Amino acid sequence: MASCRWPWRRCCSWRPAARSPGPGSLGPRGPPGPPAAADDGVQMSYFNLVKSLTSAFSNRYSMSRFHHTTSAACCCSKTRSGEKYIDPFKLGWRDLKDLYEDIRKELVISTTELKEMSEYYFDGKGKAFRPIIVVLMARACNIHHNNSRDVQADQRSIALIAEMIHTASLVHDDVIDDASSRRGKHTVNKIWGEKKAVLAGDLILSAASIALARIGNTTVISILTQVIEDLVRGEFLQLGSKENENERFAHYLEKTFKKTASLIANSCKAVSVLGCPDPAVHEIAYQYGKNVGIAFQLIDDVLDFTSCSDRMGKPTSADLKLGLATGPVLFACQQFPEMNAMIMRRFSLPGDVDRAQQYVLQSDGVQQTTYLAQRYCHEAVREISKLRPSPERDALIQLSEIVLTRDK
Amino acid sequence: MSLRRLLLRLPRYLGVSGSPRRLWWSPFLDTISSVGSWRGQSSRSPAHWNQVVSEAEKIVGYPASFMSLRCLLSDELSNIAMQVRKLVGTQHPLLTTARGLVHESRHNLQLRGLVVLLISKAAGPSSMNASCQNYDMVSGIYSCQRSLAEITELIHTALLVHRGIVNLSELQSSDGPLKDMQFGNKIAILSGDFLLANACNGLALLQNTKVVELLASALMDLVQGVYHENSTSAKENHITEDIGISTWKEQTFLSHGALLAKSCQAAMELAKHDADVQDMAFQYGKHMAMSHKINSDLQPFIKEKTSDSITFNLNSAPVVLHQEFLGRDLWIKQIREAQEKGRLDYAKLQETIKAGKGVTSAIDLCRYHGNKALEALESFPPSEARSALENIVFAVTRFS
């Protein structure tokens, strides 16, 4: 990444509307789409930067830590589809009514306690963000291909499998991070202990693999096993850290891809493979998933700084406390180089976490990260717009905007 | 970094000494005597386990060190090795597991993979040869079957590593600093996940969904088996759960038999053998694994020499059988009698068990499973590979 010298200093002169990190006050002024002429010089360089970022990472995946969705400032781009607002969640749920029940059916476990542990997060309380994207993508691809609005059984299985793989990784992540709460309740490791929690994660993963094998499509198996590998590599990336500032951002994006976006991108690709033979469509699905996934995680990282603990299912500044330098921190470090030392020692000294928080909130780190997320969302929308119009396609467009504006 | 150099370096990091360390599941090498051939088979039956293994390795073409090259040369593995190094000096179980694995790969004790290779060779190509013509075959084994053998070892190792996680809330001050244990847990989870991810990738490359399903279900069985091991292990007062021998067999199948059985079956599927052949392979794998486990459980009770401190698993076959003969109440009484100030006098309990019927019926059970394994082999054509599989059974069912 040596060729990418991020002109952050130059960008400092461009400021979004407000400096305070509260929700509702961020985002670029002016109409969506191409930048306003007055700010052309600076904004273009930033756009080029981000464009080069998005294209540079087209085949390498970044992942950042799995967090729940977090809210962010509103993005002012309008829906493309027209006047009627479609709630993507309502639309997607029609196919996912029995999602959690069906997942529980896959967990064929004889022992009560192990079954209880494995089913713990499949309680119907999650937002099922990933399965929603998957079924909407399935329909959008099916319609694009042959105007069929049905979701095939195999495509629906992918939705289940994606949610199961995601949950398995959450269970392991919670043990690794020694987390005590998630989604408003205690974690599996706190209730049943670390030994059993790890086994529960393995169990969910094996159940997902069995379901995957039963689809009977070797291409789809290859696509989704890639996710499992990416999830592990993402965790490893997180173990290490980069000395060089320029490498840090690339490292962060790669980790973000591997830990969050890969699952969404590859699940989208898998359903498109099942629904449509055209490789161009597979690529569109993949790119949509990848860009939305990265945006999702970037906003998550923003919310770690901007929201307070009673809205989320878990306490905030969680990333800092784990020693992780996410988007807002990396951007802030450009303005406050004294943060470098803290990043290197992973915020391990007393007071580091608070100081880092202060620096971030004083800087435009949050705004920059949000802006970056917007760029990824726009890219996602650009891709998905290549498909034939349909309510599902529009819902996916809508969804990418929800990603930017959610608050938990 | 070459494979050889990596394997040479790891022991130094981990402080592995020269003398072999007994693993909880491996038969004790020097006590299998040559006297008393069990089934009156040919006088060529080898006396020692490692002789059996080294002959088997010649048959399959190379020593059975199964970490896939791609996996071993990856960044992650050197990362893992470095992290495990940090654990030296702590008491995290991962260190013991890692030492055991390194020792094992030096002494070529990766049994499951070896058995999968042997049974692949013993079965040979199927009569429906057409579909396999594109596969390359080396020493009578298809490359996809070799891959499968590796995958089996990866899954086994992954769970071995995951077994070593510690519950943080149960730590005592004698276990050392909390953060060492937390760090050890972290590395153990990641390493295990890394191995599983490699196994999954390997499975995907085989391009056979039935095989993926078989191995995924074997993984599910294995996880449940490990869970039972944890749950039924003795608590503070050394009293285990009241499980009879039939429950024990079910749980042991899950934790020891399923992986090998389903892998053997999968190896047949890869060569497109029919359902009968697949079933025979499954039966061999299952029964051989059971007798192997029972043999391992019997070791503390049949060794001649009295070493200083003896311990044994209270959920092992002879003990479970002993309890079943005696009845629960009498067994609990015996445990209490063997306790002194809360500490269990294993030597005393061992004598009590040896005096009962537990040990002899465990030996019988071991031979029963050995017999079933040999029966399953009968449907395979005679060959070097089949003899090697028979010899493995003889070796694990031989008691002085």
Image: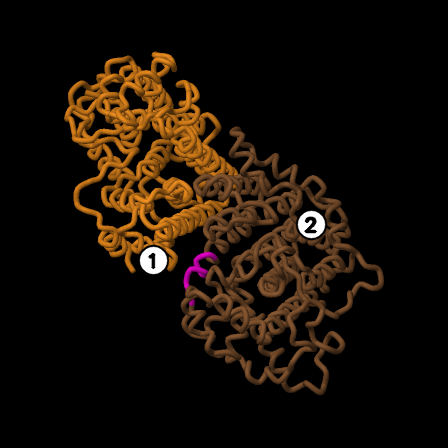
At 33% from the left and 16% from the top, the residue drawn is B333
Element type where label 2 sits in the image: helix
Residue B254 versus residue A341 in the image, above or below? above
Q: Which residue is mark 1?
A: B78
* Three-letter code for the amino acid on which mark 1 is drawn: Ser
Q: What chain does mark 2 sit on?
A: A
| Quarter of the picture holding the C terminus of chain B | top left
Residue B229 versus residue A254 in the image, above or below? above
Please rate how many residues cluster around mark 2, counting C-alpha atoms within 10 Å: few if below 14, some from 14 to 19, many from 20: many
Q: Which residue is mark 2?
A: A135
Q: Are marks 1 and 2 on the same chain?
A: no
Tell whether B99 sits left or right of A5.
Answer: left
Q: Position of residue A345 (x, y in %)?
A: 41, 67
Tell whether A50 sits left or right of B10.
Answer: right
* Three-letter code for the amino acid on which mark 2 is drawn: Val
The chain coloured orange carries which letter?
A: B
Q: Which residues are magenta?
A: A235-241
Q: Which residue ends up furthest to the right in the rendered image?
A: A83
Residue A237: in magenta span: yes
Q: How is the model colour-coded?
A: by chain
Q: In front here: B274 or A144?
A: A144
Q: Colour of chain A?
A: brown
Q: Position of residue B149 (x, y in %)?
A: 37, 41
At 28% from the left and 43% from the top, the residue drawn is B100
Q: In front here: A311 or B302?
A: A311
Q: Is residue B285 visible?
A: yes
